[in-house]
Amino acid sequence: MKKKIQLLFLVISIIAVTMPIYAQEDAELFLSAKQSIKAGEKDFAFIQFHSLLRLSTNSPYYQDALFATGEYYFACANYYDAYTSFSKFVELYPQSEALPFAVVYLLKMEQMQSQDSEYDLKKKVITFKQLSLLFSEYKEYPYQSPMGLKYKAVYFIDRLEVYINEELFETVYF
């Protein structure tokens, strides 16, 4: 009985010591990725974001890393991995402020490959926020991505326009 208690204490001690190391490691990776972005080294930032994805889905930086890897894959025309990243993002983070942008990436890739699930994705974009345009023509939602891109979603009564760094990326008609 005494050996079992000692073994249990040892296991708890090991877990208690290693948990902060993982938390510290993902914070350092995220900070390093952000510094790489500021230095214009997107390839290095991608490697660090990708490493974050392998650490733990419970990391507070997992959401940003997942979106950033999707962006990077899309920019490199690796649409299979981009689609996988953004699909997982939409599934895991349906309330994220980045959701409409991930969905628009998915729509764009589906249009490129003539896939059919476009309606469900459009529904996600439309119902993202309880949109009311009673006294205005449009409503804007900005988002700064982990890869340093500046997104803007402009909701009109009949369409959504998505801009990346002030350039029109995609228009989704309702």
Image (cartoon, rainbow, N blue to C red):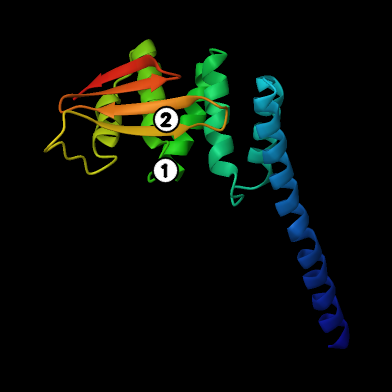
Mark 1 / mark 2, whichever is N-terminal: 1
Visible residue check, residue 85? yes
Q: Mark 1 highlights which residue?
A: 96
What residue is rendered at 33% in x and 13% in y? 114
Image coordinates of residue 142 in percent, x first then y, are 39, 32
Visible residue check, residue 78? no
Give the side of residue 166 with respect to residue 137, left or right. right
Looking at the image, which is closer to me, 72 or 166? 166
The three-letter code of the residue at mark 1 reads: Ser
Image coordinates of residue 167 in percent, x first then y, are 40, 14
Q: Mark 2 highlights which residue?
A: 102
Image coordinates of residue 100 in percent, x first then y, are 36, 32
Give the side of residue 76 with respect to residue 47, left or right. left
- List the single residue furthest toward the bottom: 1
What residue is rendered at 70% in x and 23% in y? 39
Work out which quarter of the rendered image holds the N terminus and state it. Answer: bottom right
66 w.r.t. 164: above or below: below
* Labels 1 and 2 touching (C-beta < 8 A): yes
| Label 1: which secondary element | loop
